[in-house]
């Protein structure tokens, strides 16, 4: 099963709505609660990063027996130094975004902690792709 | 202890999403950074924050929190209220700052734990 969602950069009113939709689907599929919780955190952070840092993006969720795969691909400024971006507390978010409680620099570390596999590819000036895999226990 | 009982004992106003007033509160968590809550709060936690915009709802839903307490007299805007009613996220409010709010909630939950054990 494949689901696709559009994410609008800069539109904080809808931030997290795609993740909330996906979570509802995962619950209907009766996946383990602990797995759903991990996926919820990881995809939310990836979604919010498009809203906070990119222009627009898509979230593709591929649900298969054995694993859930989520790809969040955006058109945006990209990430120069991915290793640095992964550092807890490191953020380029502006003051306004921080005041709303985003920009703690914990998003990517949260994804890493909750995903079984994480792959980030980015071309500065073009965009970023975050690929998250979580395995289901059978 | 559930939300309704806590609201009553600590004099928190139930602003919206009262369908969630029977939610059981496992513990509290205080933070104004959303990623911090995403990373560290647990299911059933009552979230103490001064963030009153719509994005707190997605965090509460995704983390399956029992509710949200807005401190320092903050109130959710109309859009947040409408959405909270729709999603069934209960939002409480108090004029107390976060420190006192957390302190009182901590004490109440601890006392309750002692009674039960
Ligand atoms: N999709 C993205 N496009 C461009 N930059 C990004 C993207 N995701 C993350 N980044 C960069 O990585 C940094 C760290 O991300 P994250 O850990 O989620 O923290 P935060 O979003 O709170 O800043 C961001 O501040 C930003 O510079
Ligand atoms: Mg982030």
Image (cartoon, rainbow, N blue to C red):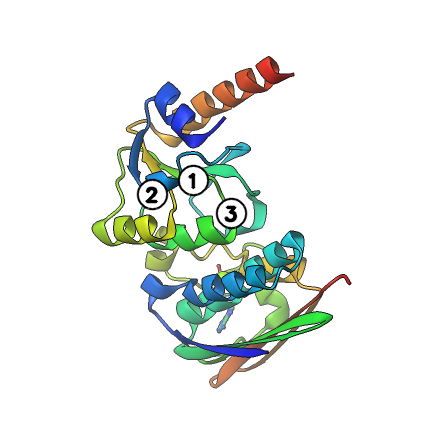
> Same subunit under labels 2 and 1?
yes
Residue occupying the point 56% across, 43% down = B43
Q: Could you tell me residue B96's position as x and y percent?
A: 32, 26
Q: Is residue B82 above or below residue B15?
A: below
Residue occupying the point 48% across, 19% down = B108
Of the numbered discs 2 and 1, the one sitting upstream in the chain is: 2
Q: Could you tell me residue A77's position as x and y percent?
A: 45, 79
> Same subunit under labels 1 and 3?
yes
Screen quadrant of the N terminus of chain A: bottom right
Q: What residue is shown with label 1?
A: B67
Q: Is residue A61 above or below residue B2?
A: below
Q: Are the residues at dot 2 and dot 1 in contact (C-beta closer than 8 Å)?
A: yes
Circle 2 packing at 10 Å, graded few (<14), some (14-19), many (20+), is: many
Residue occupying the point 60% across, 66% down = A84
Gap between marks 2 and 1 measured at Cα:
9 Å
Residue occupying the point 49% across, 43% down = B65
* Picture disc at residue B6: none
Q: What residue is shown with label 2?
A: B17
For disc 3, does the CB lie below 8 Å from ligand 2? no
Left or right, residue A4 beside residue B91? right
| Host chain of mark 1 | B
- Per the image, label 1 sits on a secondary structure element best described as strand
* Picture disc at residue B64: 3
Left or right, residue A111 beside residue B102? right
Residue furthest right in the image: A138
Q: Are the residues at dot 1 and dot 3 in contact (C-beta closer than 8 Å)?
A: no
Screen quadrant of the C terminus of chain A: bottom right
| Host chain of mark 2 | B
- Per the image, label 3 sits on a secondary structure element best described as loop
Q: Can residue A65 be seen here? A: yes
């Amino acid at each position: 099963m494949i689901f696709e969602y559009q994410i609008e950069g800069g539109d904080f009113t809808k931030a997290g709505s795609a993740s909330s939709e996906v979570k509802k689907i995962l619950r209907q599929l009766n996946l383990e609660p602990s797995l759903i919780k991990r996926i919820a955190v990881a995809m939310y952070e990836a979604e919010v990063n498009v809203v906070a840092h990119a222009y627009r993006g898509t979230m593709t969720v591929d649900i298969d027996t054995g694993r859930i795969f989520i790809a969040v691909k955006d058109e945006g400024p990209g990430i120069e130094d991915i290793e640095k971006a992964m550092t807890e507390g490191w953020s380029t978010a502006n003051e306004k975004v921080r005041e709303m409680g985003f920009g703690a620099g914990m998003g990517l570390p949260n994804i890493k902690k909750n995903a079984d596999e994480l792959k980030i590819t980015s071309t500065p000036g073009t965009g970023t792709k975050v690929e998250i895999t979580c395995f289901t226990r059978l | 202890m559930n939300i309704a009982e806590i609201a009553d004992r600590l004099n928190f106003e139930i602003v919206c999403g009262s369908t969630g007033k029977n939610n059981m509160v496992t513990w509290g968590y205080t933070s104004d950074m959303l990623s911090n809550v995403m990373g560290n709060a647990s299911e059933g936690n009552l979230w103490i924050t001064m963030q009153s915009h719509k994005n707190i709802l997605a965090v509460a839903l995704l983390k399956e929190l029992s509710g949200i307490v807005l401190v320092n007299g903050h109130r959710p805007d109309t859009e947040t209220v409408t959405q909270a009613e729709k999603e069934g996220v209960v939002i409480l409010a108090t004029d107390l700052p976060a420190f006192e709010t957390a302190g009182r909630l901590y004490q109440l939950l601890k006392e309750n734990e002692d009674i039960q054990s």
